[in-house]
Image (spheres, grey):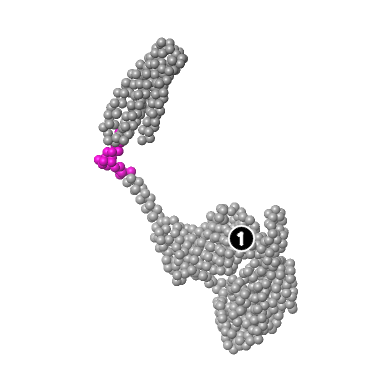
Amino acid sequence: MGFRFDLLLLFTTLVLLSTIAPTVLSDVILSKVDRRIDLTSQIVRVTSTLKVENPGPDPVSEVLLTFPEIQAKDLAYLTATLNEGKGKVKKSGSNLLINVAKPEELPPSLIFHSVSLPKALGEGDSLTIDVLAVFTHALRPFPEEITQADIQLVLFQDTAHYLSPYAVKVQSLTVKLPKARIETYTKLENTNIHGSDIKYGPYENLPPFSYAPIAVHFETNQPFAVAQELVREIEISHWGNVQVTEHYNVVHQGAKSKGEFSRLDFQARPHLRGASALRNLVAKLPPRAHSIYYRDEIGNISTSNVWGDPKKTELVIEPRYPLFGGWRTTFTIGYGLPLQDFLFGLEGKRFLNFSFGSPINDLVTDNLIVKVVLPEGSNDISISTPFPVKARTRGIIALRTKISHLDVAGRPVVVLEKTNVVPEHNQYFQVYYRFNKLSMLREPFMLISGFFILFVSCIVYMHVDMSISKSSASYLAKLQWDEVRATIQQVVSIINQCLSKHERLEASLHDLSRTGDVQACKTARKTADSLFKEYSKELKPLLSFLQSSPQATQILPKVEELVAKEKELQERLIAKHSTIVDCYEKKIGGRELENRVASHQQKVVALKQEVDDLLDYIEEI
């Protein structure tokens, strides 16, 4: 209801203006006005053909266009061109200069734009101007919330009379709707409906600031896709590629969805259960676009198709889920382009010629940020745009830097920003800069130098002796410790051989109890005695070396203890062996044999445990 109240205030102001305006701006007359309002999409396009006459003696060099303040805030694009008559409109170069004007003694609730004429109109002269005004967010969903099964209805409000500070002789208005279904509309004099068009007029002899409020409530199931923010990054590489990356934050700003969403109903009857849902977006990319991708925060999105021809590349993308009113999604589109199609040279400078707006059809962008990343080393940068943009500047244009691979100082970035962007803004802009061709050799030279330094470093490393000097004390100490370690390993090896012989002696006793062969058991003991003597001889020089080496001071007591314990273990095993053999020769058995052997056996078990512990300790060191 807020915008209705604003229009009521506006019309009240216009009533007061109509009593004084004719005396203020009476030197121009609009002899014929033909307005056409296109409501077939969420973007409202108003085309006005104005035949301007100058009945007064003073020459007229400008014509004022008037918009209510509440309507002007949604004005996204405004252009005026000369009409040569018979439906012919002058092409590029004939756009007339338009500036915001502030006439005196007129209220601030009206916004004026001044159209500069190519030449002043003399007395009795006339010309025809075509004015295109594009508005966003001018269609209000009514009701504001609908279920999945409901159709989307919107409300549009304007005036049937052309709002102008000049008198109008004849004027007519045509409102074009997307469908013939109309809920309600304002009926005035000379109002007719032809299919999906509502025609008002003609109306004759209208005074300045004449008005006739109208409202049209109609069905439209077109999705209201709005990019709340779009960041386009255009990166130039002089190695032959222009990389474009576009980050979208899209919301469906139609009637908000209420209630539950049924995927089954949507799949079965998509045109009845979700008629206003956003199913896909179509982007018209430049021809020869390659390496196209479509992804979001989760990863790649496979629901996309690409068609190409010599004039364009068409990309059709589907979100992960259909967008109903109030729902939103974020995604990224990226693609590469041939450099020669967009980069040119002029007077010693290079310039990028690229489209400004989004390539997606019928998309409204609330805030558009365009970043042009130039090669490192670019300087003397300037820009040229066909319409005003906000440049985040320090002086003339924004100069940020982006660090990429093999960059030293960073690449200069030109940042342009514009709000309320529509497809009509998808025009070419230019970024001029100077770039030394020798700067292209910087990255290859860095790569070559890096590999060269790496190979030279490897060669030096392989040919330079990095070891410690053989005459230093630390090197000598290391050698001595290595000798000590080798000696200890020999000692441990001999001890292990002795332990294996112990096991053989134990095995001979088991054979004796099974076969009763005393002679075989004595032979095994004699063989073991001779081997133990040989091992003892081998240990003597090793122990002598350890006793003479200062590096073995800490470990020597443990080694000596190991040798002593193993020697004692030998003696106990021999004594045990002799006792058992004597008992078998004297035919002593049973409990008396066990009593004679028990003391030896207990000591043997204890000594074996001590020897094992000492071996573990020495091996750890």
Which residue is drawn at the image coordinates 61% and 60% (left, top)?
Answer: 328
Q: Nearer the viewer, residue 575 or 170?
A: 575
Question: How many numbered discs?
Answer: 1
- Residue 468 magenta: yes
Which residue is drawn at the image coordinates 42% and 58% (left, top)?
Answer: 407
Find residue 145 and report its image quarter. bottom right
**Three-letter residue code for mark 1:** Arg
Could you tell me which secondary element the residue under label 1 belongs to?
Answer: strand
Q: Nearer the viewer, residue 124 or 392?
A: 392
- Residue 233 magenta: no
Q: Is residue 482 visible in this depiction of the protein?
A: no
Residue 401 spot, x, y in % from top left = 45, 63
User: From this viewpoint, which residue is outermost toward the top?
Assistant: 586
Which residue is the site of mark 1?
328
User: From this viewpoint, which residue is outermost toward the bottom?
Assistant: 57
Q: Is residue 80 left or right of residue 502?
A: right
Q: Quadrant of the C terminus?
A: top left
> Is 355 above or below relative to 262?
below
Residue 168 spot, x, y in % from top left = 66, 82
The crowd level at tag 1 (other Cα within 10 Å; few <14, some 14-19, many 20+) is some
User: From this viewpoint, which residue is outermost toward the left?
Assistant: 471
Find residue 330 and report its image quarter. bottom right
Q: Which residues are magenta?
A: 462-483
Q: Is residue 263 left or right of residue 244?
A: right
> Is 567 above or below relative to 80?
above
Residue 90 spot, x, y in % from top left = 59, 74
Which residue is drawn at the image coordinates 47% and 69% (left, top)?
Answer: 393
Residue 495 spot, x, y in % from top left = 36, 26
Q: Is residue 264 visible in this depiction of the protein?
A: yes
Q: Quadrant of the N terminus?
A: bottom right
Which residue is drawn at the image coordinates 44% and 17% (left, top)?
Answer: 594
